[in-house]
Image (cartoon, grey):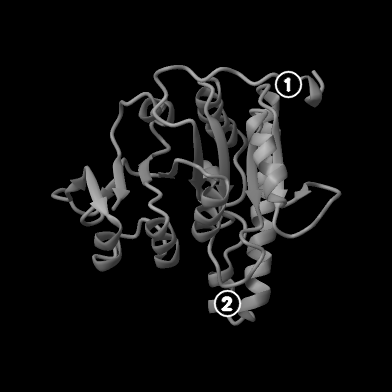
């Protein structure tokens, strides 16, 4: 089917949000191998995205690049920070292309949109065009961060979510919400049902970096932290079910 033949689907009445941003780390795509891309894991995440797309929800995505290269890590090893950050941005483009391939193999139309122009492999970021893609029910995968060094993909996801008028950011992690301490290390770790932006910042809860949290707070954009490893978790939350933590005012 040609892209022009796409027909928008009708949102189901049980969807909690109509347009969302899904932010996941690059590490979420590397599976058990510890580095790079693990195709079965990429496909599993793509199926989770498709299950929500099938509900009629408009989806934006931002994927980190830590499974390939992390700018801060390169900088810590002596590389000049700006160069290291640009390398990290290019890693996110590779992950975005992998996710695009996985989604389109499932019949989901997508666009990879890069903050760093590279017309041969993806579209440049133009806000109005990206909004139009969402209206046509294409999944928009935003790559290359904000296009600037010193900004994380968390900040890029929050920025794009605001620009696209998303109703929430879904932060997919390895745990089912925000805890007062590491639940892997501490059996008595307490999961929060809800937590405020200011509490996240004051208690250093590690949901997102400080600039991303501040940007979400200033625009009253809720952040929903959930486990990406739980099958059906993404779809369940949008249907008003599941276990997660909501970060808001």
The reply, left or right, for residue 220 in relation to residue 200 is right
Query: Which residue is disc 2 drawn over?
Result: 75
Disc number placed over residue 6 in the picture, else none: 1
Q: Earlier in the sequence, mark 1 or mark 2?
A: 1
Relative vertical location of residue 202 with respect to residue 184 in this rendering, above or below? below
User: What residue is drawn where x is 64% and y is 31%?
Assistant: 135
Q: Residue 158, position in %: x, y?
A: 49, 54
Identify which residue, 159 or 139, lies in the foreground.
Answer: 159
Q: Nearer the viewer, residue 60 or 81?
A: 60
Q: Nearer the viewer, mark 1 or mark 2?
A: 1
Disc 1, SS: loop
Residue 183 visible in this rendered orientation of the protein: no
Q: CA distance from mark 1 to mark 2?
A: 44 Å
Which residue is rendered at x = 57% and y = 40% of the image? 60
Residue 81 percent across, percent down from the top left: 61, 78
Residue 243: image quadrant is top left
């Amino acid at each position: 089917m040609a892209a022009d033949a796409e027909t928008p689907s009708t949102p189901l009445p049980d969807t909690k949000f109509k347009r969302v941003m899904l932010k996941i780390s690059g590490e979420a795509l590397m599976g058990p191998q510890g580095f790079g891309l693990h195709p079965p894991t990429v496909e599993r995440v793509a199926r989770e995205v498709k299950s929500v797309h099938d509900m009629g929800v408009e989806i934006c995505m931002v994927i980190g690049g830590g499974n390939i290269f992390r700018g801060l890590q390169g900088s810590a090893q002596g590389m000049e920070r700006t160069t290291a950050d640009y390398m990290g941005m290019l890693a996110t483009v590779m992950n975005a292309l992998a996710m695009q391939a996985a989604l389109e193999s499932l019949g989901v139309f997508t666009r990879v949109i890069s903050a760093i122009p590279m017309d041969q492999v993806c579209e440049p970021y133009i806000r109005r065009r990206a909004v139009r893609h969402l209206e046509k029910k294409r999944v928009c995968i935003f790559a290359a961060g904000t296009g600037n060094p010193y900004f994380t993909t968390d900040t890029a996801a929050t920025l794009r979510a605001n620009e696209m008028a998303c109703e929430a950011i879904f932060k997919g992690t390895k745990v089912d919400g925000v805890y007062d301490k590491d639940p892997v290390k501490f059996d008595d770790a307490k999961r929060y049902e809800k937590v405020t932006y200011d509490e996240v910042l004051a208690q250093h809860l590690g949901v997102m970096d400080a600039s991303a949290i501040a940007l979400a707070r200033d625009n009253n954009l809720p952040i929903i932290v959930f486990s990406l490893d739980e099958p059906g978790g993404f779809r369940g939350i949008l249907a008003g079910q599941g276990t997660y933590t909501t970060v808001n005012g």
